Amino acid sequence: MGKIVVIGAGGQLGQCLRTVAAELNIGNVVFPGEGEANILNVEQLNGLLGKEEAKYVINCAAYTAVDQAEDDKAKARAINETGAANLAEACKAHGATLVHISTDFVFRGNEVKLLTEEDVAEPINVYGETKLDGEQAISSVLKEHYILRTSWLYSEFGNNFAKTMLKLGAERDELNIIADQVGTPTYGIDLANTIFEVIAKDEQKYGLYHYSNDGVTSWYDFAKAIFELSGTQVKVNPIPGASYPTRAKRPSFSVMDKTKIKETFEVEIPYWRDSLAVCIGKIKEQG
């Protein structure tokens, strides 16, 4: 399938891609360190893609601190928009296809409906704005791209909601968790498998796709499932988002329709709770 270069290899999804590449024995994947793959360094990017003769580039690099982005707009925009544009330009120059990861936070999320790729994106926070601008920058520069919007990403790697809940559940007897924000968790290993599946099929059906695990839940029910599946004894109280104000607004309903990616690439998507059980098992193995 040609050489694949992973940008942002040290992050959560980068580590998931590394794990899946090893499990599937995909030997043509390169995981450069941040010092060799800075998306704000155009010369460095061009040097890297030229040296590796990349056929595919997977961009996992992003500014993802949603609340901090409200006060750090310049950095969020540099990474999520300018960096994405730089990468698209480098891919164009070297004949590579870009797989770029985006987010459900590009949506306003004020309506209870499954969100399709055709629905209007209308972000309500800086993070969502800069990710949407990154999508648009890529699509204006490079035809050969796949943009995969995902949601509520977690795994046995990095910092994420599942690992935070397990840590807090071990320390406290009681937790208050928001119950009126609804979406779908995504297990990073499932997303990584899907990315490699899309690349392996090499069907050149470029464009925008939605990918998360199947099903619907709230942060409260997600937390409850984490504790049930891990055998953690902790009381969990559902609270409205208004009781826990954050610097950035969040969509109240951001469940994405995955019909397009399922039908285009014949992808099978696991139910969120089944994947959560797998992840909890992996975290327990890690101790």
Image: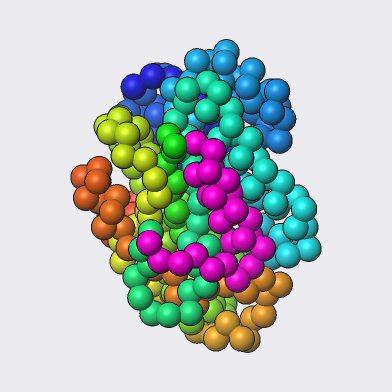
In what quadrant of the picture does the N terminus appear? top left
Residue 118 in percent (x, y) is at 38, 62
Q: Is residue 45 visible?
A: yes
Q: Is residue 73 left or right of residue 286?
A: right
Q: Is residue 122 magenta?
A: yes
Magenta segment: 118-142
Residue depicted at 34% across the width and 70% down the height = 114
Residue 282 in percent (x, y) is at 41, 46
Using the image, determine if residue 121 lies above or below residue 77: below
Using the image, determine if residue 132 lies above or below residue 61: below
Image quadrant of residue 79?
top right
Residue depicted at 49% across the width and 65% down the height = 121
Q: How is the image coloured?
A: rainbow
Q: Is residue 124 magenta?
A: yes
Q: Is residue 19 visible?
A: no
205 vs 65, nearest the viewer: 205
Residue depicted at 64% across the width and 18% down the height = 47
Q: Main secondary structure of the magenta part?
A: helix
Q: Is residue 211 left or right of residue 43?
A: left
70 vs 169, nearest the viewer: 70
Given the current orientation, which residue lies at the most extreme front position? 140
Residue 285 in percent (x, y) is at 43, 44
